[in-house]
Amino acid sequence: MKRIFYYIVLTLGAFIMLIPFLWVLSNSLKTVDNVMKIPPQYIPNPITLGNFKIVLNELSFLKYLGNSFFVVVFNLVGTVLSSALVGFGFAKFDFVGKKILFTLMLATLMMPAQVTMIPTYFIWSKAGMLDTFLPLILPAFLGQATGIFLFNQNYRSMPDVLYESALIDGCNPLRILFQIYMPLSKPTMMTLIVLTFIGAWNNTMGPLLYLQSREKYTLTMGLLTLDQSPIAAANVGVKMAGSVITMAPVIIVFLFSQKYFVQGDISSGVKG
């Protein structure tokens, strides 16, 4: 009986959390007349995909979608590779200053991004990389504190005999990392992929700072500037369609990787 009560409470809570998204989805599928109808129409009648066609074809969201995927893919590759390498180094090698470096690396987690915003912009500006995707991509290849910490915790939990046996068999450290340790750390990797995907996909400040040409905008920038379009200003449904297109990939990625995400979260929290 208690279990049923918990399920009812959780289902009710989940439904309440979903109400804003359902409302956005509902309005995105309505005609322009039905969006502002009083009393509100909860289920669209008729259902139309016209708002999505306007956003994708006339407001360049298809181009923004491609730009976002381009930035996100490179962020995923860079973050996973660099974090795995650095995390593996901290976990399996002893060197002078290791504890101090690891502590400093963790301390960067406490630093607000706004603190480094101006010096970082100055660096990219001097390097002549403004209005390119490089400022949004290159930092991912320099390691990310959360990812390094997750991989470090995961690799430290694996027995040293695994590493030593591979060395005796003639494997070098890089081969041990990519052929043995990384396949065994799939939940950690998926956790980092989900976190990186969400962070890179929803990143608005980065594109706002570094991108100036409209054809290079990402989806978040497209959504931010949607109000400037007369078509979107006259039809709330178009704005809702833009929001659904922006949110949908994050929800899909989370749903398909939820199992690994939870496993990685538990293992990094318990085994550390």
Image (cartoon, rainbow, N blue to C red):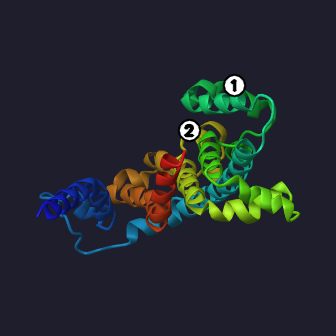
**Considering the image in quadrants, where does the C terminus appear?**
top right
Whether 171 is drawn above or below 145: the answer is: below
- The x, y position of residue 157, in whole percent, is 61, 51
Left or right: 248 in relation to 201: left
Front one among 81 and 135 = 81
Q: Amino acid at mark 1?
A: Pro
Q: Residue at x 43, y 51 (%)?
A: 230
Kindly identify which residue carries mark 1.
Answer: 119
Residue 69 sits in which quadrant?
bottom right
Helix or strand or loop: what does disc 1 sit on? helix
**Considering the image in quadrants, where does the N terminus appear?**
bottom left
- The x, y position of residue 233, in whole percent, is 38, 50
Residue 225 seen by the camera: no
First in sequence: mark 1 vs mark 2: 1
Residue 24 seen by the camera: yes
Whether 104 is drawn above or below 15: the answer is: above
Crowd class of label 2 (few under 14; some 14 to 19; many from 20; radius 10 Å): few
Disc 1 and disc 2: Cα gap in Å? 15 Å
Front one among 63 and 264 = 264
Kindly identify which residue carries mark 2.
Answer: 205
Front one among 45 and 86 = 86
Crowd class of label 1 (few under 14; some 14 to 19; many from 20; radius 10 Å): few
Q: Amino acid at mark 2?
A: Met
Helix or strand or loop: what does disc 2 sit on? helix
Left or right: 93 in relation to 194: right
